[in-house]
Image: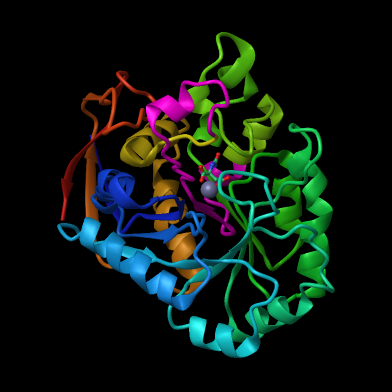
Amino acid sequence: MQLTLNSPMDMHLHLRDHEMLKTVAPLSAHPFAAAIIMPNLVPPVTTLQMVEEYKARILEATADETFEPLMTLFFKADYDYAFLERAREHISAIKLYPAGITTNSQDGVSSIDSEQLAPVLTAMSDLGIPLLVHGETDGFVMDREKEFVPVYETLATRFPELKIVMEHITTKESVEALKRYDNLYATITLHHLLITLDDVAGGLLNPHLFCKPIAKRPEDKAALLDVALSAHPKVMFGSDSAPHPQHAKESCGCAAGVFTAPIALQALAQLFEAHDKLDNLQPFISDNAQRIYGITPPEKEVILIKEPFTVPEKYGSVIPMFAGETLPWRIADVS
Ligand code: NCD
Ligand code: ZN
């Protein structure tokens, strides 16, 4: 049994920098044709020079592959119109983080007041720059995303022409909001389609499945599966693959992030096949994102075959999801 995917894209990816970049970037650049690159470096990517220099380092690390890094800026409330007009040629989107909500987000926005942010958001809307949002409040960890829905609603209503992507959604409330507002879109990760809080903390604690937003309830997972498996036209695959070295995960003060880049397509094939929805993987993995972002990725054909793939225990210092386990699909060819 064989499956061909055309130009798969990962619409939410952390590639980090330095040695980690060199380790992980080729693992995405081999199977994926393009990816939205998150800007939460230390310090965050906030200038066009930083964007271009980071892009050059990514291209250098992925020189052996056909891969387009789609760059983003870290949202700042003081970006002015002239800057954003220049930025448009260099970036695909701007990522907004509430301050301190996740890894390297300390410089994010401390209060998401749509009037205070109006100058930047109006400019982004006029210039056609999508706003990507990490949608969590600082409330109780299981309720953070649900509590953020009114913020999405205010933004969607106040800026009706602005494309707003609800990043890595994990709740049924987000799925409902997505359907209610024309200008809301969403990315969904692999791990949130597969796990609930039980897999993280229901038995022995599994730090490799600890991430932000935290995995939720079975009914939330069911709502995500419903829109992903049907390739709802407003949802896109975004792995949120977020590598941390083993010592940062297997420690007191475990870093948030699941590393899925090298196993994502194989596990998605398994999931979509199990639900008899393999035909919907192509729109979920590329076509919807092409339409939503208005982009054409480089041509790349990825052939998966139904043969066992034993996931390596480690890639450099990073433990992937399903480390040491055998998945039923493997990547047979990329051209
Ligand atoms: C991400 C990271 O490590 O950069 N971590 C995570 O748990 N997803 C940041 C993020 O997307 O929240
Ligand atoms: Zn992320």
Horizontal and vertical percent position of residue 72: 49, 67
- Residue at image position (51%, 36%) is 257
Q: Is residue 278 above or below residue 194?
A: below
* In magenta stretch: residue 77: no
Q: From the viewer's perspective, tell me whether residue 177 is left or right of residue 275.
A: right
- Residue at image position (43%, 61%) is 287
- Residue at image position (22%, 24%) is 308
Q: From the viewer's perspective, tell me whether residue 140 is left or right of residue 218.
A: right
Asked whether residue 183 is in view, the answer is yes
Q: Main SS of the magenta segment? A: loop
Q: Which residues are magenta?
A: 226-255
| Res. 155 image quadrant | bottom right
The residue lying toward the viewer, choosing from 108 and 236, is: 108
Q: Of all residues shown, which one is farthest toward the top?
A: 203
Horizontal and vertical percent position of residue 120: 69, 78
User: On the rendered image, what quadrant is the C terminus found in?
Assistant: bottom left
Q: Is residue 252 above or below residue 248?
A: above
Q: Is residue 247 above or below residue 98?
A: above
Horizontal and vertical percent position of residue 83: 56, 85
Q: From the viewer's perspective, tell me whether residue 326 is left or right of residue 199.
A: left
User: On the rendered image, what quadrant is the N terminus found in?
Assistant: top left
